[in-house]
Image (cartoon, rainbow, N blue to C red):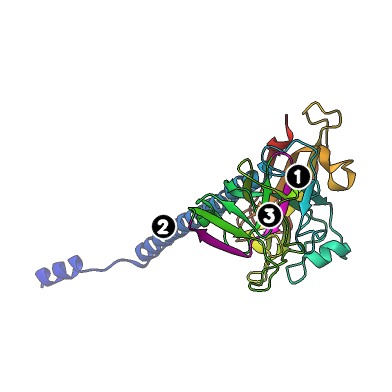
């Protein structure tokens, strides 16, 4: 009997107090693990969000700097006061006016667009009210040498033209004394080991905008381009903020010539641009001004682009941020993570 009692004593379970203590300790441990996991998740989301925004900022800096540096490049005649003859249709429109200063800016765009912008952006996302728009003109890619005097309907280029250009490209041909803008309507290999660059009248090939003047060349010396001349693709590029219909977020859009505008980077929430003017011809910036205050676009030798970029996700910061931006502040309205990015480019083709 005593042995059975002893066995019962050894088989006795936990008391109610012991169970409650164990449950309490387990609960504390679970709360700690939950808190740790939650903290790690929040840290990961913040780190990931910051990384993506910074990656977008680096991409924009590289893209914008490359385009801005080449504004107005015209080969050996870049700094000369030489008239460029534009033979395109719509030669005075924003998309194809290649004889102006190479820069056009719009400051704090209103809800009702200026007429020329409204026409230019037909079918594209509308610019965000209060943001800026930058429109620049310059070359795309490398130049190609002319290998023989042109005739009335075509130019004769080096073999590199076969891969550098395609039908529909807008081209500038220049020889340090004169320049012309035209559109390629055909490219053909020639038996004389050269490439024929045709500027026809759209009869056989439809290109936009097409050539208003397609028959030009010798014996008029003002239309003769020989072995001292170069060909380079030329384009108008616009940058502005619009709402991306795919996700409802603001994006930096890029529009080339008359093509449809496409989003370059999503999550750009503010865009302001100031222009550095050289007012005394010493190749130094004397003042930075917004587009409405620029006295002469020909005097602009530097461009300062300021942007605010934000994360895709909200809930990354405890409260909305306030950032220094465009000589004032940017006040966030949500808990995304935001940063400012400044891209300053010297227009090297305008510096002696």
Q: Foreground: 39 or 195?
A: 195
Residue 21 lies, in percent from the top left, at 39, 60
The earlier-in-sequence mark between 1 and 3 is 3
Using the rendered view, name the quadrant where residue 119 is placed.
bottom right
The earlier-in-sequence mark between 2 and 3 is 2
Screen quadrant of the N terminus: bottom left
Where disc 1 sits, the SS reads strand
Q: Residues within 10 Å of mark 2 (few under 14, many from 20)?
A: few
Looking at the image, is mark 1 or mark 3 nearer the viewer? 3
Q: Residue 29's mark?
A: 2
Q: Are the residues flagged by discs 2 and 1 in contact, CB closer than 8 Å? A: no
Q: Residues within 10 Å of mark 1 (few under 14, many from 20)?
A: some
Residue that label 3 marks: 235
Residue 338 placement, left or right of 49: right
Where disc 3 sits, the SS reads strand
Q: How many marks?
A: 3
Instruction: Kindly identify the residue that appears in the image at 75 percent across and 50 percent down.
Output: 220
């Amino acid at each position: 009997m005593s042995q059975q009692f002893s066995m019962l004593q050894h088989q006795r379970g936990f008391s109610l107090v012991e169970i409650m203590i164990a449950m309490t300790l387990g609960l504390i441990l679970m709360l700690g693990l939950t808190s740790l996991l939650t903290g790690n998740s929040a840290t990961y989301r913040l780190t990931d969000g910051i990384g993506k925004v910074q990656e977008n900022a680096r991409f924009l800096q590289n893209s914008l700097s490359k385009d801005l540096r080449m504004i107005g490049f015209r080969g050996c005649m870049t700094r000369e006061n030489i008239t460029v003859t534009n033979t395109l249709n719509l030669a005075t429109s924003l998309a194809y006016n290649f004889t102006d200063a190479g820069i056009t800016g719009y400051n704090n765009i209103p809800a009702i667009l200026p007429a020329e912008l409204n026409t230019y952006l037909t079918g594209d996302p509308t610019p965000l009210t209060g943001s800026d728009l930058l429109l620049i003109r310059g070359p795309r890619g490398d130049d190609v040498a002319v290998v023989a005097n042109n005739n009335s309907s075509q130019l004769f280029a080096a073999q590199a033209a076969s891969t550098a250009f395609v039908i529909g490209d807008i081209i500038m041909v220049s020889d340090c004394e004169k320049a012309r803008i035209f559109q390629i309507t055909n490219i053909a290999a020639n038996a004389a080991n050269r490439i024929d660059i045709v500027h026809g009248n759209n009869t056989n090939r439809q290109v936009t905008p097409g050539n208003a003047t397609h028959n030009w060349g010798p014996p008029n010396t003002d239309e003769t381009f020989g072995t001292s001349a170069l060909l380079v693709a030329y384009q108008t590029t616009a940058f502005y903020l619009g709402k991306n219909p795919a996700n409802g977020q603001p994006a930096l859009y890029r529009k080339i010539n008359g093509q449809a505008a496409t989003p370059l980077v999503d999550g750009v929430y503010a865009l302001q641009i100031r222009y550095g003017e050289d007012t005394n011809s010493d190749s130094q910036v004397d003042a930075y001004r917004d587009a409405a205050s620029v006295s002469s676009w020909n005097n602009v030798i530097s461009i300062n682009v300021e942007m605010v970029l934000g994360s895709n996700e909200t809930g990354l910061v405890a409260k909305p941020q306030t950032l220094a931006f465009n000589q004032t502040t940017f006040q966030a309205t949500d808990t995304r993570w935001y940063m400012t990015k400044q891209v300053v480019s010297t227009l090297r083709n305008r510096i002696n």
